[in-house]
Image (tube, rainbow, N blue to C red):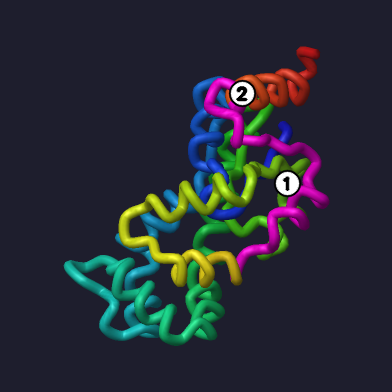
Amino acid sequence: MIILGLTGSIGMGKSTTAEMFAELGVPVNDADAVVHDLYKGDAVGPIDEAFPGVISNGEVDRAKLSALLAENPTRFKDLEAIIHPLVRDREKAFIDRHRALATPLVLLDIPLLYETGGESRVDAVAVVTADLEIQRDRVLKRPGMTPEKFALIQSRQMPDAQKRAKADYIIDTGHGLDSARAQVKALVDRLLGKV
């Protein structure tokens, strides 16, 4: 089984690209979706203890947590110490399940793959990229996004050029969906030995 890691900075089109892999039948473990699920379950207690006041209706209130972290970015480390082991447990269960099924290729969609040493858990890494102008335009169109919030997020991410230099494969999403879809198909075919 080949484990492909997919990563890319905010606004590069990583989630859309992961969907393209899924459309081709590649099982995807989406770390963001796992975190979203954990914020409604296993992570609630530990986060409530570490960050009092960020729980609403029995789940982590992302807006409250985000505001708290914006005020005190050093607390990201505390959050990561809670979340990362839980995410890894889910990821391991996903891999074990597909290994047992003899799935030929799986995708781990990991936003901070390089920043967290995730490349050691995959066989190869594909980085999703686009020009800075396209990235900025996409991100600033998101609800509640500000140039300041974008800058804070960027400060926690490895620069795109560094990610591209480390990547085994690059998927450029700056030329439209059809182009990205063709790149994904070519990569899947290559990894599965169809080329």
Q: Which residue is mark 2?
A: 179
Residue 100: quadrant of the picture: top right
Q: Quadrant of the C terminus?
A: top right
Ranked by sequence position, the earlier of labels 2 and 1 is: 1
> Residue, x 50% and y 45% (percent of image)?
30
Q: Could you tell me residue 1's position as x and y percent?
A: 72, 32
Q: Amino acid at mark 2?
A: Ser
Query: Which residue is at the front of the view, 119 or 130?
Result: 130
Q: Furthest-front residue in view?
A: 133
Measured from the top left, where is residue 180 in percent x and y?
60, 28
Please tell me which residue lies in front, 43 or 56.
56
Q: Where in the figure is residue 17, as x and y percent of width and height?
A: 55, 34
Is 179 located above or below residue 76 in the figure?
A: above
Q: Is residue 66 above or below residue 183?
A: below
Q: What amino acid type is highlighted by mark number 1?
A: Val
Give the side of residue 69 with respect to residue 192, left or right: left
Q: In this view of the protein, which residue sits in the foreground, 113 or 123?
A: 113
- Residue 65 percent across, percent down from the top left: 35, 74
Q: Residue at x 17, y 67 (%)?
A: 57
Characterize the local packing of mark 2: few (<14), some (14-19) or many (20 or more) Cα atoms within 10 angstroms: some
The magenta segment: 156-180
Q: Which residue is mark 1?
A: 122
Report the Cα–Cα distance between label 2 and label 1.
Answer: 25 Å
Q: Is residue 178 above or below residue 49?
A: above
Q: Is residue 58 magenta?
A: no
